[in-house]
């Protein structure tokens, strides 16, 4: 079983950047596809990005393509979400998640393991 701990959230202004990190422990992160999700106040949690076990491919939601990028370091057991040109509507709690997957799989749902989340605030 893998445990996930996010960090890197904070307050930024519109257009600024932030990098979130998620440290995995308890099990090799390379066993899992990893994803980032977010939940804004009063809204449902939504998928943001996913990356294959070996970091060969990534997939992000349309609204963040070109601005948000997911990456991972399976040696350090850390997955990242680089967020550029942030918008006020992207203020949310960002969650890291893991799930078992076959090689090359890019799951957008079905995640079993979740972190506690890290808050991102974007001021206008």
Image (tube, rainbow, N blue to C red):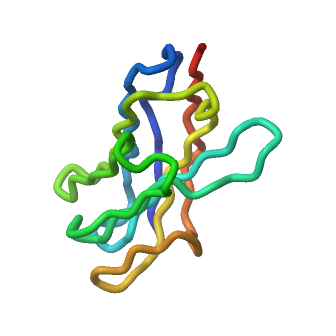
The answer to whether 103 is drawn above or below residue 123 in the figure is below
Q: Residue furthest bottom?
A: 102
The answer to whether 71 is drawn above or below residue 123 in the figure is below
- Which quadrant: the C terminus? top right
- As rendered, which of 77 and 49 lies closer to the eye? 49
Image quadrant in which you'd find residue 81: top left
Q: Residue furthest right?
A: 42
| Number of numbered discs | 0
The residue located at (77%, 36%) in the rendering is 41
The answer to whether 89 is drawn above or below residue 116 in the figure is above
- As rendered, which of 17 and 78 lies closer to the eye? 17
The answer to whether 51 is drawn above or below residue 15 in the figure is below
Residue 99 image point, x, y percent = 47, 72
Image quadrant in which you'd find residue 20: top left
Left or right: 114 in relation to 78: right
The residue located at (28%, 83%) in the rendering is 103
Residue 113 image point, x, y percent = 54, 63
The residue located at (46%, 64%) in the rendering is 98
The residue located at (67%, 44%) in the rendering is 39
Left or right: 93 in relation to 30: right
Residue 57 image point, x, y percent = 26, 68
Residue 25 image point, x, y percent = 37, 55
Image quadrant in which you'd find residue 55: bottom left
- As rendered, which of 23 and 66 lies closer to the eye? 66
């Amino acid at each position: 079983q893998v445990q996930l701990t996010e960090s890197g959230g904070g307050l930024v202004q519109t257009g600024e950047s932030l990098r979130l990190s998620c440290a995995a422990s308890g099990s090799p992160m390379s066993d899992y596809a990893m994803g980032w999700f977010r939940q804004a106040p009063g809204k449902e949690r939504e998928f943001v990005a996913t990356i294959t076990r070996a970091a060969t491919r990534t997939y992000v939601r349309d609204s963040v393509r070109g601005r948000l990028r997911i990456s991972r370091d399976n040696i350090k057991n850390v997955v990242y979400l680089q967020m550029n040109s942030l918008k006020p509507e992207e203020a949310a709690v960002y969650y890291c998640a893991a799930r078992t997957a076959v090689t090359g799989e890019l799951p957008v749902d079905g995640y079993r393991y979740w972190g506690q989340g890290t808050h991102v605030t974007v001021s206008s």
